[in-house]
Image (cartoon, rainbow, N blue to C red):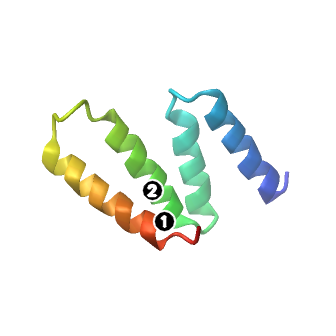
């Protein structure tokens, strides 16, 4: 399976299971292994942020949001 097909398979799995972080985290591992560490970190941080209930940990949420913003700003959109 070529690289593009692998990306498409991961994205399909993510789309098919929107409430399941497992495909996202496996995709993050795949991205890390294929030289896209920033995008992998972004996915992992977004998953972590989504698991924090409400305003239960404002300092951690602020840290995650700050780093997510840095990564988003640096990505070539």
Give residue 38's mark: 1
User: Residue 69 or 10: which is nearer the viewer?
Assistant: 69
**In the foreground, 1 or 75:** 75
Asked if residue 40 lies left or right of residue 17, the reply is left
Q: Name the mark on residue 42.
A: 2
- Expressed as whole percent of the image width and height from the top left, the position of residue 55 reads 18, 35
The image quarter containing residue 35 is bottom right
Towards the viewer: 50 or 32: 50
Q: Could you tell me which secondary element the residue under label 2 belongs to? A: helix
CA gap, disc 1 and disc 2: 6 Å
Question: Picture coordinates of residue 69 (x, y %)?
Answer: 36, 62
Mark 1 in CB contact with mark 2 (< 8 angstroms)? yes
Give residue 59's mark.
none
Drawn side of residue 44 relative to residue 17, left or right:
left
Judge whether 77 appears above or below 19 on screen. Answer: below
- When the figure is inspected, residue 66 is found, relative to residue 13, above or below; the finding is below
Asked whether, in this view, residue 54 is left or right of residue 15, the answer is left
């Amino acid at each position: 399976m070529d690289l593009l097909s692998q990306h498409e398979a991961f994205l399909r799995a993510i789309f098919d299971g929107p409430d399941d972080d497992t495909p996202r985290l496996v995709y993050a591992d795949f991205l890390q292994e294929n030289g896209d560490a920033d995008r992998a970190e972004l996915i992992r941080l977004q998953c972590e942020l989504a698991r924090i209930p409400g305003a239960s940990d404002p300092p951690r949420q602020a840290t995650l949001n700050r780093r997510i913003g840095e990564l988003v700003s640096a990505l070539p959109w």
